[in-house]
Each structure stands twice: as C-alpha cells, then as structure tokens.
Image: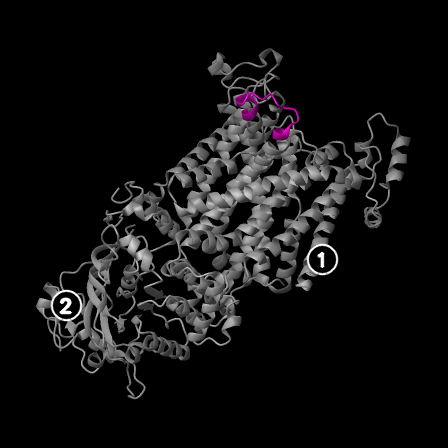
Amino acid sequence: MGRYLVGRLLQGVLVVFGVTVVVFVATRMIGDPVNFILPLSASQEQRDRLRTDLGFDRSLISQFVDYIGDVFRFDFGRSTKFTNEDTIDVVLRFLPKTLQLVIAGMLVAFVVSLVLGMLSAIKPGKVTDKLLVTLSLLGLSMPQFFLAQVLIVFFSVRFGWVQIGPGPWTHVILPAVALALPAIGRLAMTVRSAMIDELNSQYVKAAKAKGMRRRRIVAVHALRNAAIPFVTLAGWEFIRALAGFTVVVEGVFGLNGMGSLAILAIRERDFFLIQTIVLVVAVIVVIVNIAIDFAYKAVDPRVKLG
Amino acid sequence: MSDNDTPQHVPDEYSARSRETEAALHDEQNLEGRPYEVTAATKGVFRELLSDKTGVFGLALLFILGLAALLAPWVAPHGPTEGSLSTANRKPVWSGGTWEFILGTDPQGYDLLSRLIYGLRTTLLVSLAVVLVAGSIGVVIGLVSGYRGGRTDRWIMRWVDVQVAFPGLLIAMIMIAVIGGSKTAVIFVLSFNGWMVYARMTRGVVLSVKEQPYVEAAELIGCSPRRIMFRHILPNLVSAISTLAVLEFARIILAEATLSFLGLGLRFPEVSLGIVASSGRDYIFSTPRLIVIPGIAISILVMAVNFAASWLRVALDPREREKRFAANVLSGASGAGQ
Amino acid sequence: MTTNTNTETILEVRNLTVEFFTRRGTVHAVRDVSFSVRRGETLGIVGESGSGKSVTAQAILGLTELPGRVTGGDVLWKGSSLVAGSDAAATVERIRGKEIAMVFQDPMTSLNPVYTVGMQVSEVLVRHMGMSKKDARARAVNLLDMVGISNPAKRLDQYPFELSGGMRQRVLIAAALACEPELLIADEPTTALDVTIQAQILDLIADLQQRLGVAVMLITHDLGVVAGVCDRVAVMYGGKLVEEADADDIYPRPYHPYTEGLLRSTPRLDVVSARLDSIAGSPPDLREVMPGCSYAPRCAAVTDQCRRNVPSLEVRGEGRRVACFNPR
C-alpha cells in the first residue's frame, strides 16, 4: 500500500509538473509578455528594464529552471496586481472561500443524488423517477452561469429579497446550490442506473430468497455496490467543480474565491499569480484524486491498490 | 424486417429478462391481476426507433436548428451587429414591440433574435469542429495505444492520465487569454483539453476486440496491422464513439458558452450563444430577457443533443431496444401491433 | 436413501402455469405442472435447459420476476397458498428463508461481493430469529462448521472473492439452513462447480438432509446427480411434468420415452461405444402451444393420437405418474 501511495504521488508530481510547463510555455511564448504588463504608454527603456527584471529576456529553459528553483525555495513570484505580495500568500487568502463553497455544494450534491437515485430505482417509471429524470436533464443541459443567474433572479424577485448584497443566501447557500445542481443531474442518473442494475443482480435475488426485507436489500445490499461507480464519478464532479465551475459561480455571485482570483489574474496578466493559482489547483486536484482511490477501496473490498 | 427472420431457439429462462426491462417493470403492482398478451411485434427496427418520442423530438429539433444556423444570413431578420443606438432597447413582440425585432433589441441596438441565430451558427460550428478534431486525435491515439500495447500503451496512457488531471477550464482560459479569442483558438484549446476521453474509450474497445480469436486469425493470415485496425476494429468502435461524440458535443457547447460568457472565449465581433448571454449579464434586473432568452436557447439546444444521444445509444444497441419495447408495453402505450 | 416414515405433504404444487411476456411472443415456461413434496423426502426435478424447472422453483418462492408472471394454478405450503388470495404475499414473506430456503446455481454471483461471508449468514438469523448480532455471529460459526468449512471463525470475516467455489456454495447452504427450514430448494447447486467439488456438495446435502430431516427439492439437468441423492424423481420437458416415480423404480424402468431417451444418452464409462446416443431433434419453442404432446416430434413411439391430444399425467403403478399415451 505504501508503494502504491508513492507511485500515485509521483504521478501527481508529474501532473503538477506538466501543468506548470503548459502554463509557463503558453504565457511566455506568445508575443512579448512585457507588452501585456505595461501600458502602451510605457517607454522602451521601461520595457527593457522590466524584461530584465522579470527575466523574460533569457531563454525559455533557463527561465523555467529558475522558476522551479524558486518554487522549491517557496518563492512563487510577486504579484503585479496585488502590489508585490508573494503570489502564494494571495492565493492562500482566497482559497478557503472556494473550498468552503465546493465542499458544501458537493456534499449536498452527493447526498441528494444518492437519495434521489435510490428512490427512482425502486420505483422506475413512477412520479419520483420521472421527476428525477426531468430535473437531471435540466441540470445537465443548463449552462452553469445561466443556472446561477436564474437562481439569483428567482430568489430575489420571487421572495422579495433584493439581496444582491452579502448575506448567507448569496454567500453560501445559493452558490452551493448552483454548483450542486448540474452535478446532481449527472450523478443521480448514474446512481439510478447503477441501482437498477444492482437490483437485477443475482445476489439481490438470493437475498430476497433469504427473506431479507426490501428496505435492507435496497439500502444495504444494492446501494453499496452501486456506490462503487458513484465514488469515482463523484470524485470527478468534485474536481470539475473545484477546478472549473467555481470560476463561474464565484463570478456570478461576486464571491472572493480562487475562481474570481483566476479571472482577475488572467485579465490583469499577472503572470506569476496565474502560475501559482494553477499550481495550487493542480496540487489540490492530485490530492483529491488520490483520496478518490482510497475512498474506492473503502467501498469495494475487492480492490487491491497497486 | 420481421422478427421471424432470426433462427428460433429455446429461450433460456433468464434470457427473457434484460436489465432495464425489469427495472421499468419492477413495480409488480402494475400487473396485478392483468396478464398482458403481447402479440409478436412485427414492426421494423427503424419504425420502432421512431417510437422513442423524446429521441425523435431531439433529432428533429437539432435538424431545424442546424438548418437555421446554416441558412443564417437568409433566416435572420437582421445582421448580428447591425444596429445603432436608435434601435436600442426595443421591447419584444409580446410586450408591445414590433415584429421587426421579435425578441427585442439590446442596449447596443442589435436584434436579439438575429444574434441568437448567428450565435447558434458559430456555436454549432465551433463545437462540431472540436468534436471532429478532438475525436480524430483521440481515436488515433487510442488505436495506436491499444493495438501496439506494451510500452507504447503504458506511456501513452500515463500521458493521458496526466493530462486528464489538468484543470481544464483554467487552462483553457489562460490559453485563450494568451493566444486570443478567435474561433480557431477556441477550437484548438477545447480540443487540447478534450481528446483524452476518446483515446481512453478507443483503447478500451481495441483491447477487448484484440482478444477475440478472429483478430488473431487475421494476424496469422498475414493481414497488415493497419488493415486489421480498419476492417475489424473500426466497426466496433463506431457505436461507442458515436454516442460519446454526441455527449461530448453537448459538453463542448456548454464549455464554449461558459468561456464566452466569462469573456475568455470568443469575443466581439464574433457572436456565439455564450457571447449573446454574456452581453445581457449586466442587465439582469433591468432587462432580464437579455440573459434569460439566450440561456433558454442554450439549454434547449443541449437538451435536444442529449435526447439525440440517448436515441442513438438505443439505436445502436439491440438490448436497449428490448428495454424500450417492454417499457412501452407496460406504460400502456400501444407498443405492439402499431 | 432414507425411507420415509412420515408421509405428510408439506408442499403442494397444483396446475402451476408461468408465462413470460416478451417482445417476441409469450413464453409458456411452465404449463400446468403439479407435484408435491413430503416431509423429509428428497425430490429430484430433472430436465434440460429450458424445460421450466428453475422457473417452477422460483415461482414457488414468489421470486418470479417480470416479464414473467404466475398465470395459473396454486402453490400450497402446509395448506396455505403462496400464490393466490390476499394473504399469499404475506405468507410468502413470512416463510421465505425461514421455512423454505433456496440455494442457487452460481455461488459467486449469489453472494454480495462487498460484504463479508459472516454478515451474509448472520443477517438471516437476525432477520428471522431476532437474534442479536453477537449471538448470530456465534451461531454462524456453528453453521459454517456444520457445512464443512474449515476454520469457520476466520472465514466469517472473509469476503466471497477470497473463497473457492465449493466453499462459497457451502456458505450459501449454511445461510439457507440457518433457520432450520423444512424445505430446501437447490436449483442446480453443483452445475457451476468442478466435478470433484460437485460430489462433495451433493454429499453434504444428503448428509444434512439426514441429520436435520429437511426436505430437499433438487433441481438439475444431470441424472447422475439425482441418482445417489433423491428418493423420488420428476422429469420435466417443454414446461410440463412428464414422469414422476421413485428413484429406485425410474432408473431401471423408465416409462416415458423422454426419460428413456435421457437415460440412454447419458454417457457411461463402463460401456465402450463408438457413438454417443442422443435424442434426435431439438427442444420445443416454448412460445408455441402445440396441439399434441410436446415431445411428439422427437418421440420414437409417436402415434397420431400423440400429435392431436395432450396426454395428461396419470397414475400408472405404485407411486408412478406418466404423461404419455404409449408408455413402456
């Protein structure tokens, strides 16, 4: 098991490395990065000086090597937008909000999709099922930003709250719901179909022959088996939310999380900040991936890691 | 094609069941006291497929939308960026506006309906291109990886695993910011992020087909690897990849819309559904239709694609057809003898 | 073979009919089948694939799944109906796993792969006998020991994938017998196992039957399996019961042509022959309801009457019933 962990960590390092390379190359290769940072009015002298300062005049490889060296010394570069703070400090300031949002949203999503999927599988074709399928489809098909906006409008107008400002609703609940709904759309359908498969299996029939109560067969026997594919998918949803959709949701609700920071950094061409954001996200993604593996093993005892 | 073509054999007691057939019929109360006499279905396969109402609806809708997009210059009442402040903020037809601007105009004076139609065109074009590019790359890589096996396979899959773990949206945003927001750029970026799933699936299919005896036989006769790949493996791929491609198509539509909405995808003067939606962003309380209507348009489009995808899945898999048949019978719809 | 001192009938199947409604027609899997099982006896139900034997077994315990449905007849357990009437469902719920237990063909898929073997045996005890988890666990150890599993306490905490096929089947038998049922239905319990293990499991069943006095309904396609274990044998063909007799009588003197054909086509090790005997033709398509005897197309003794009328099951001798116009 230890060997497996090491292997996965190594792979994780590779991932982070790969991501860094891609971003590094992308941000430096096209045009002159200095032109992005300085306003048009800057003089040639200023440009040259900045170029040397930030090391853009050296070869790509040497820049990269330097960067890696810096990272290992915990120097992630200075942010241009946040006047010379080390970028890692900036990122870590914005991270908790995002984590809070994603964890809340995904927890809701997981529980709801398990319950809904299970209920639907028990009575396929009936009301719950049809409801689930419709909601699922909607959740799947609506673009996230639209969903988020609809939620805002709906709650503000319908319930007479002109709460576009801060408050528990806009800061936590609605954004979490906006994150959760598309995930529920995808996950609930999977749970449903996995549960249906499991309920048709031989061991369920055998359990029935043993006289086990229906509730037990569904919630204990079938659910755990159905949870196996669910774990993997749920993990992917978590990552998707964290590394992607949070950007949209934070943007729409005006939250100060990593997503908003990323947009800001990109707009402002804050190179080092961008790099650090991507680095941190990649690391988190790797950790979550490994966690998924272990969760998988916890659910399915047959799995041998490594 | 009648159902009596296939050779008769004694059905095993368990073969009469197929997974979701039972699921759909799982609730025994349904049949309480009323056995169903089902006469042998004589409909052809195609006709039966058409009985999937949502699927047909989805396909039809897509067809119409596709046509509209294709013929945009003739179908749209105005150009996408044709307008001025004098035509700004006109109300839609149902709130007292004129038929000239059916869905009203935006604060820049552009007709919403026209922008939607042109936007649809761009969105469909870009998404289709991404599916084709990413799909081709992914399938080829998957074929090579699966067929060669060994070290090649291992290394390719490692690379796939690594790239799958990339935070896609972030990278897409960054790349677009750097290389600009042209259609080509967006296509490139979305393909860059999206080929892996095709590779994985293709490899999976190749691996399972490769084990089959008939492939080994072909190798023994001396067929070249390329020939084997095309003649034997490709047909098996078609059904799996088609379904995947359609689902990816839906996902890419949403991805493009999201990118454009954030301002980090296509940009003015391009028009895509996402761009149309984003321009309504600031007016959410004053003129909600500017964001609601494009949002609904995107949702309907994606829903239609999803319906078509599930239709396709059933069309390509005979077992699924059986399920649907049973579901029809049980819900009382006239499945048999139609 | 035990001699029956107790002739009380505990299970009675009367004119049972089960049909499956599929896309390609209605499959008449079980047609008007009647037989009974007495306390403590072992009844073997023999037939090839598709003869309806498994469907019959499942119908008894109310396990018929859609698109199948019991469409006629009745099953009586100690006088109460398991199929018809408003109490039937409740009765079946009550006795399933407790008074009638069932063991299925494939031990791998009959066990839930993600739970321990111990859990799957104990849960029966908890459910039916109201035992506490601790007590159930202790009893489970005894049960595993009873079915011949070595090191039972350790096995309790193992998962199905850690056990061999034979052991898994033993576990299933243990779970089935946990509440000391009066009837054990074994649906092809050895078909999925190696030949050597087959013998062990059959011995186990025979042994348990003697020790616990449980009646056994053994379903199989293999005549060899039936010979050493069963008191009585019922032969099914095309969804119908065609012959029923004591095991001692049926082997030397089969009456129905199908039974005779079956016996004849069983390869023997002591007689060297150039070709294997088989029954010409193929099993009937259960979707059709033919006018005459369903075996007619393959029967050597067929007459016109056979093709026109369906023979009913009639008593022809001591403890023997045959459905044939021209039995031997």
Crowd class of label 1 (few under 14; some 14 to 19; many from 20; radius 10 Å): few
SS assignment at label 2: loop
Locate residue A134 relative to residue C99 in the image: left or right: right
**Residue, x 63% and y 42% (percent of image)?**
A103
Name the disc covering residue B90, or none. none
Q: Is residue A155 magenta?
A: yes
| Residue B188 visible somewhere in the drawing | no
Residue lying at the far left in this picture: please name it: C305
Locate residue A116 relative to residue A285 in the image: left or right: left
Residue A294 point in image, percent of width and height: 62, 56
Identify the chain of the residue marked 1, using the numbered disc in the image: A
Marks 2,1: beta carbons within 8 A: no
Q: Quarter of the image containing the C terminus of chain B?
A: top left
Residue B94 point in image, percent of width and height: 46, 16
Crowd class of label 2 (few under 14; some 14 to 19; many from 20; radius 10 Å): some
Circle 2 sits on which residue? C313
The relative height of residue C188 versus residue C199 in the rendered view (above or below) is above
| Residue A215 visible somewhere in the drawing | yes
**Residue, x 51% and y 28% (percent of image)?**
B296
Locate residue A202 relative to residue A168 in the image: left or right: left
Viewer-nearest of discs 2 and 1: 2
The relative height of residue B184 versus residue C57 in the rendered view (above or below) is above
Highlighted magenta segment, given as a residue range: A154-170
The answer as to whether the residues below labels 2 and 1 share one chain is no
